[in-house]
Image (tube, grey):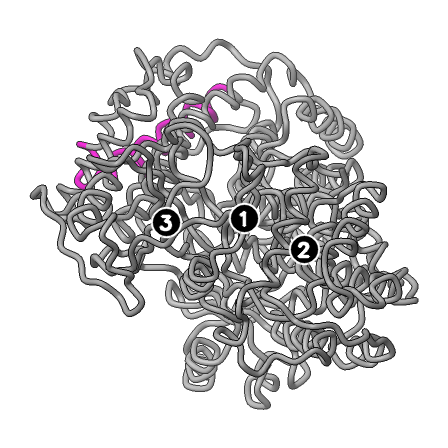
Amino acid sequence: MGAHPARQPTVYRQFVELARRDGKLYNGQHNLNFVHLLTPEMARLVSLNEGTEVMVRIPRRDVPSVTVKTWPFEEAAILVAIKDVVPGAPMCLMEDWGESELYTFALGAELSAFHRDGTPVNGKLIAAMTGVLALLPLVPLDALPRLPANWPESGDSRGFLRHLAGLADRDIRQANLPVHGLLFRMLGIPDDGLTTLAARLPAMTSRPYSLLHGDLHRGNVIIPFVRDSPVRVVDWELATYGDPLHDLAVHLVRTRYPAYQEKQVITRWAEAMARTSPESVRGLHEDLCHYLDFEHAQSVYPDVIRAAHELERSPDRQHLADAVHRVHRALTVAAGPLAMRDVPDPAEIADVLDRWTRFRCGTPVGGGRATESVDWRPERGHPYRDDFTDAHVADALLAERSVPDHAVHRGTAYVNSVVRVPGRCTPVVIRRRTEGRCPRREQGVLTEHLVLRQIERAKVGVAVPGLLALGDDGDPAGPFAVHTYAGQGDGSAPPEHPVDGLRPHEADDLVDQLCELTRVDYRGLDPTATDDGFYELLTDRLVRMVESLPDKSRRLAEEYGLPGPEHLGRILSRYRTGPRTPSLLHGDLHPWNLVRLNEERFALSLIDWELAMVGDPLYDLVRHHHLTRADRVVQDHMLRRWEGTLPVDYTRGWQRDRPTYERLETVRSAYLDLDRLVTRTDLEAPNVDRAVASVKRTLGSALTKLGLAPGRMANPYLRRALPSQ
């Protein structure tokens, strides 16, 4: 229950500072959430056991206000009101009005970790979420905080929606006009859109008011590790009181179900609500559209404001592309409800956001200057090539500032912009590291530009990008590298990757190129490499990677039955591989790191050498088969060709060691894919997207190969949450 800050304020505020310094941070749109263990003093204060995990929530001051709050600073009272109605609801243990709040913490995984926006959700989970909404009419009004003055009377559905529109216009649109009004007008958003929408509402069916969550999206649904409830709904600060149909509309719009699943959600909501408040279902199919229109209309303001705010903080091409996509989607769905004349296309939106950010920050998007000159300095390792001079580098960087979206390709570690340089027949690629929210779990051993230079010096039959430049131009995205373009044509179309499998001649070509890599002098890259101990090195790296996973990722892996790092190390140490002469390895030959060339000499180009290493040449081929899900017949053909091409000291005993590497890669993928689900890292990369979509199959295979049984979950909804193809 909430406590006034005058009660032991010193102990509480000291704990808040401790949580801010040492706690695990979970960023939210409106708050900073720090999870920490209760100290003895705080444990006595809130009557919980010492060492219990709790969450300190601190409102964010660095983001614009884009919400309507019926009961500001009253979430603690709302949680008290629902305590005996909504299973698993959090409790507010203490609060410092408007400064911080202390909550119980439910260890689990957000639904958004398993199913991101636009993907289908398991039917049992839909039933659990709509079931929570159906419980809210059971919360009596007199248990809730006092409603603001002039609140519409219960049953007046049209009056409630009109009131919502007025609040959104006042608290979101008008409140942000001093800063963002010009941006709204530049994008064609009408000033009277919300008031006009409210005015043209028809008569609506009367439904009794009830408590509403007001913000039920995937990130506010927790699937707990302990089965006290199938799901826990958190973050009640936007709760309100009104027509239950509004909560359904908010859930549909903000959860972003695929279109075919929306009818299922509506049906489940109606079935659950009919059991607790049958009157709330009246007029469902006639009136839901009005609430959906309102939700789409009012959402355009926070979506535009947040996109612009993020772009102001990070004015680079990556964030500009994200902002354009977000704003275009928001305008498209809001155009009808707001009676907009037309929706600007992505190029127009990019121009508006560019001019807006330049106005706000004083510089063009991308960190450049207003003039048409580019200042840059070469980095250590810059090649100083006669065929790509300093002037060529400057021209490429200038072209990068206006590169279209279709010429920007993202991987897990780099953003690649394909640009044309005057005087060159073929395009070049500018590579910059991405700004990931989490450190990359698989770290490279060798430096990519050194690997490319070593391959070039060896003059071997391997098609790789040529290194043209390394430098720093002060761009917020960091230093750059310029490579030759690997692909067909002039770069106007995206490169073609063998996503659906290698063609026969491509499989042969890849094997031949991997064999050619054995001719590269690996000692210049890793003089410590030997012909033995490579498997032990890989297992040690995997165990250390598992050790470094966030607590939530490791706990989730253990819930599914995967072993902890020590146990994993013991299992993997039972196996060995025989000695083979080492060679340079690419290390990450998934389909998107292979580019179709269709040239007479090469069928494929091998790109993205960020995970290159020196080691057993068998490993590169086995990992490639795992990452591409190659057919077993194709795998066997490629291995036979590989064995027949190389001397025996590179291939001896490969049949015995192949399953050992296959086991290692399956296990690695299981941990990585679960971690990506939890942390939402790299999911925009196509190879990662495909991997996490099949995580259920990967988990099952990993457990089988480790000789383990699936974990006995306290909450079976965790297993239902796993995406499956």
The answer to which image quadrant residue 614 occupies is bottom right
Circle nearer the viewer, 2 or 1: 1
> Which region shows up in magenta?
158-182
Q: Which residue is mark 3?
A: 483
The answer to which image quadrant residue 454 occupies is bottom left
Q: Is residue 456 above or below residue 16?
A: above
Q: Are marks 3 and 2 in contact (CB under 8 Å)?
A: no
Q: Which residue is mark 2?
A: 673
**In the rendered structure, which disc, 2 or 1, sits on the residue that comes first in sequence?**
1
Q: Is residue 86 visible?
A: yes
Q: Is residue 195 left or right of residue 623?
A: left
On-image quarter of the N terminus: bottom right
Residue depicted at 61% across the width and 48% down the height: 688
- Residue 451 among those drawn in magenta: no
Circle nearer the viewer, 3 or 2: 3
Q: Which residue is mark 1?
A: 606
SS at circle 2: helix
SS at circle 1: strand
SS at circle 3: strand
Q: Residues within 10 Å of mark 2 (few under 14, many from 20)?
A: many
User: Percent x, y for residue 398?
Assistant: 19, 42
Residue depicted at 46% across the width and 82% down the height: 18
On-image quarter of the C terminus: top right
